[in-house]
Amino acid sequence: MASTEPEGDLVTGPPAIDPQTLPQTLKLGPTTLSHGITLRPLALSHAQDLYTNLCGPSNYNFYKYLPAGPFHDIEAFTSHLKSMLDGSFYYPFSIFSSDPSHLSNQNPNATKTREEEGEKGEGTPISIICLLNISPPNRSVEIGYVLFSSSLQRTTAGTAAVYLLMKFCFEELHYQRVEWKCNDRNKPSERAALRLGFRFEGIFRKHMVVKGRRRDSAWFSVIDDEWVLQGKGGVRRGLEGWLVGENFDEGGGQRRKLEEVRGGE
């Protein structure tokens, strides 16, 4: 008689946590590997600093592959942030930077404002990154709506921001799969996913309609086994080995690429 037992590996370990249920004082970092980056849940009080870093004509290209934007004034941008906070699809974070060269940190009132809001020493919010497609029953979550300022793109601090969020998903929220999806025309995002250690899974054809246009989506993922792997190919091991201070020279240049660190024994 054929077995009626379900097939597949039995899921064990603590249940995944929906970040929407967490207190709004949630704080990630700073850690020794954060390179001046802290993640906090997005708040409307961050709107002006985020607008300074993410909006304006010189930044319109940031929104090419995003579902909304660009935003031509602070009112429209704030309204968009409010819609993200009021909905249930996104769990957005503001990325704070303490780097004095980052644009909003040059506001003389920024330090005072952040101290009044309990964010002393973290600098100011300069970018946004989100959790979405949050599915605790399936222990799966996506990192997306990555809106990095020009000062954070292709930087060590930008890598640190994604590392902090991946670590949070796997080790504090107990997810077993973290996804990364992007428009298949968005080759910089695809390269970023592979560099960070995500594996390409395929193209979902005609997956979405974004701003009236068809989108084929490239899917990537990291699973918990790959995150904790201590040998060659370990994703956490690679990121932490790359982010340590010893991997950078006095000018901030990397001594070894992230792919080289992850690929070493």
Image: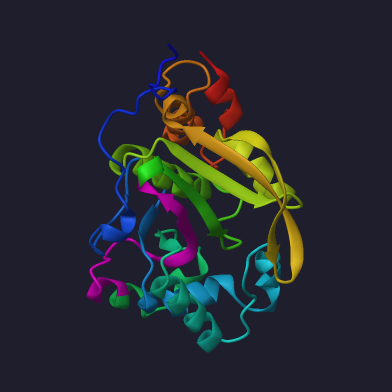
Indicate the quadrant containing the N terminus: top left, top right, bottom left or bottom right.
top left
Q: How is the image coloured?
A: rainbow
**Residue 169 magenta-highlighted:** no
Judge left or right: residue 115 versus residue 101.
left
x, y percent for residue 126: 48, 66
Question: Measured along the vertical axis of the image, is residue 101 above or below residue 157?
Answer: below
Range shown magenta:
114-136
- Residue 73 visible in the current orientation: yes
Q: Is residue 176 above or below residue 5?
A: below
Could you tell me residue 87's position as x and y percent? 42, 71
Question: Quick check: 255 left or right of 174?
Answer: right
Q: Is residue 249 visible?
A: no
Does residue 31 appear to the left or right of 239 in the view shown?
Answer: left
Q: Residue at 25% x, 58% y: name it.
A: 22
Q: Percent x, y for residue 110?
A: 37, 76
- Identify whether 23 is placed above or below 253: below
Residue 225 picture quarter: top left
Residue 168: x %, y % from top left? 35, 44
Question: Vertical placement of 51 versus 39: above or below?
Answer: below
Residue furthest to the front in view is 1
Q: Nearer the viewer, residue 66 or 202?
A: 202
Which residue: 57% across, 71% down? 54
